[in-house]
Amino acid sequence: MSIMGPPSASGRFGEYGGRFVPESLIPACFELEAVFNEAWGDPEFVGEYRRILSEFGGRPTPVTELRRFSEKFGVRVFLKREDLAHTGSHKINNVIGQALLTRRMGKTRLIAETGAGQHGVATATAAALLGLECVVYMGEVDVARQALNVFRMRLLGASVVSVVSGSRTLKDAINEAMREWVASVETTHYCIGSVMGPHPYPYMVREFQRIVGEEALVQSKEILDGQVPDYVIACVGGGSNAAGTFAGFVDTTAKLVGVEPEGGAAINRGIPGVVHGMRSNLLQDDVGQVLEAHSISAGLDYPGVGPEHSYLASIRRASYVTANDDEVLNALQVLSKFEGIIPALEPAHAIAYVIREAGKEIPLGSTVLVTMSGRGDKDAELVAQLLGDDV
Amino acid sequence: MPRESLGRLELALTDKKMSGGKLLVPYVCGGLGDWVETIHAIIEAGADAVEVGIPFSDPIMDGPTIQEAAQKALEAGTTPWQILSEVRRASFSVPIAVMTYYNIIHHAGHERFAKELEQCGIAGSIIPDLQLDEATDWIRVSGENRIENVLLAAPSTPPERLKRLADNSRGFVYGVGRMGVTGEHASLADSASEIARRLKECTEKPVLVGVGVSNADQAALVSRVSDGVIVGSALVRRLLQGGGPQAAHDFVGELRRGLDAG
């Protein structure tokens, strides 16, 4: 039995998870759970999911050894290249799965939340591919700072709703998508972008991302003559690329490390709480109001974290660390200059941790697999500003 | 259930229902403006019980009006403990139920929160994101502290679950009048009378319909089937627009007359 198997009947990973949503949504959660379980055991469904990810999504993505980087830092680092998947990140794995489920449930419309816009673009892409209607909820603040992604979504045929409630960022985009889902649940599937939300989402999204870890396990064994890497490292906001990666390695000897942003470190700085349908670690004030996260990376700018990560932390199967904005900006430049790979700000957190801890927490000579969850094009403008460059 | 084992909220509502009256439970957002005076005013205008909102940062069951009220109250520095102690000081003449989201209770701890409610003279709790399957422990702990936890039943709830839900609800059963979040609508959804009918078929407890009940006509219409209504956004909008306790009194008076005229 894998440590990352199915959750309990109530959707719990240890004490975390569950289904904390309005009664109106409960039947839809039950339906989704039943349809997902049936589909995930159906060779025809799984075959179509894998076929689309291969023909359309560009899978399998390669594993790249970082030779100059490794020489400089004294640890042997490999990247699982989700930045080379279609739409530029691992998000495509999840949305293809959920879009196929939407069709299987006879629903015709997808809604999604997005922060930086990567999940929104991926959802709009899957909707276009399968002929589904698509509406993406995005905080007003993010709409302004990610104008290019807003245009990409519209080009793909999706409508983008600018959310003006609360802090006007990802947290509020999720609230608004949930409210809209309550009103349209009969025809609409809510395509959640990470391993969060009410059961079965955290489990289902991890299963759709498991392909990252499964491929990486086979690929790294090939490179390492049958051995697994000493460390497997991924960034964690909601935590979907980390969950998918860890799922491939959790039953091996590899040490699993999730890297949170300093200003949105739910596991490192939060305590258990309930929001967005789940019980998990959460940044909150002294009476339980949810705090806003502050990170350079919009994709990790989230006060909560997927419940399975809280569980893996509680049983100490994975450790969770943080990287700050300065370390992340530095890591982005180092990887670009040494390897010709411009990472997104999110996976740059994982690189930053390797740079900081090589020869310390990570002994010299260790083998390290890092999931490169997305490419850096989307962040170029922001990074230029932060570095004082005019573009 | 024998009369002596009923809680205060259910007893008050059942007595009124037995006397042939329709039930009116308005919602007021705690911490918004002169909310304590507002509650006194709406009780005088004929409220049978009052739902007092404890604002939460992420109210996923609420539409724009109640979101705005909650945000204003939070910006004014409102805390749950402040609201509870003001309710205690005010000692209102009808039962009070608090409406909040589960993280506020989770954060405080079930025992502590239930004891605090009891000490402040609060009769019930309504927690829209704590559905039946997750509510077992809170129902037990709140019950031990004489707090009646009201469960919500939705138009999408299947029949077998509706019955279990009604059986486990205390105080009354909250029928959600439409698939959606709180807010005003030009007309009453068909689902409002439908959820009332389905609930009346499976419970003797008072059945109140809220979410999308916006004025006296709509209240009277759904109360032909239900035992009464909960009205939130329509009242809160008047308060946000600057109407004080007097405007609240006038509006609740209208609702009262609408319900009494049938």
Image (spheres, helix red, strand yellow):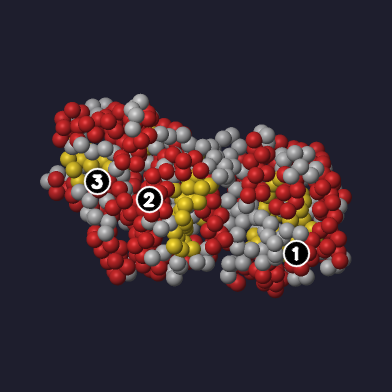
Label whose residue precedes the other's in the sequence (2 or 3): 3
For the residues labelled 2 and 1, the Cα–Cα distance comes to 44 Å
Q: Secondary structure at mark 2?
A: helix
Residue at image point 66% right, 33% down: B77
Tell us which disc is closer to us: 2 or 3: 2
Q: Which residue matches tag 3?
A: A81
Image position, residue A350 (x, y; %): 31, 36
Q: Which residue matches tag 2?
A: A152
Identity, as a three-letter code, of the amino acid under mark 3: Arg
Question: Do the residues at pointers 2 and 1 share their chain?
Answer: no
- Tell me where residue B211 sits by quadrant: bottom right
Residue at image point 45% right, 67% down: A108
Image position, residue A344 (x, y; %): 32, 39
As drawn, the label of residue B218 is 1
Q: Name the side, left or right, on which A230 lies relative to A210.
A: left
Count of numbered circles in the view: 3
Q: Quadrant of the C terminus of chain A?
A: top left
Q: Where A158 sits versus A370, above or below?
A: below
Pick the front one: A156 or A328: A156
Pick the front one: A9 or B79: B79
Residue at image point 22% right, 31% down: A337
Identity, as a three-letter code, of the amino acid under mark 2: Arg
Q: Secondary structure at mark 1?
A: helix
The answer to whether residue A53 of the structure is visible from this angle is yes
* Disc 3: host chain: A
Tell us which disc is closer to us: 2 or 1: 2
For the residues labelled 3 and 1, the Cα–Cα distance comes to 58 Å
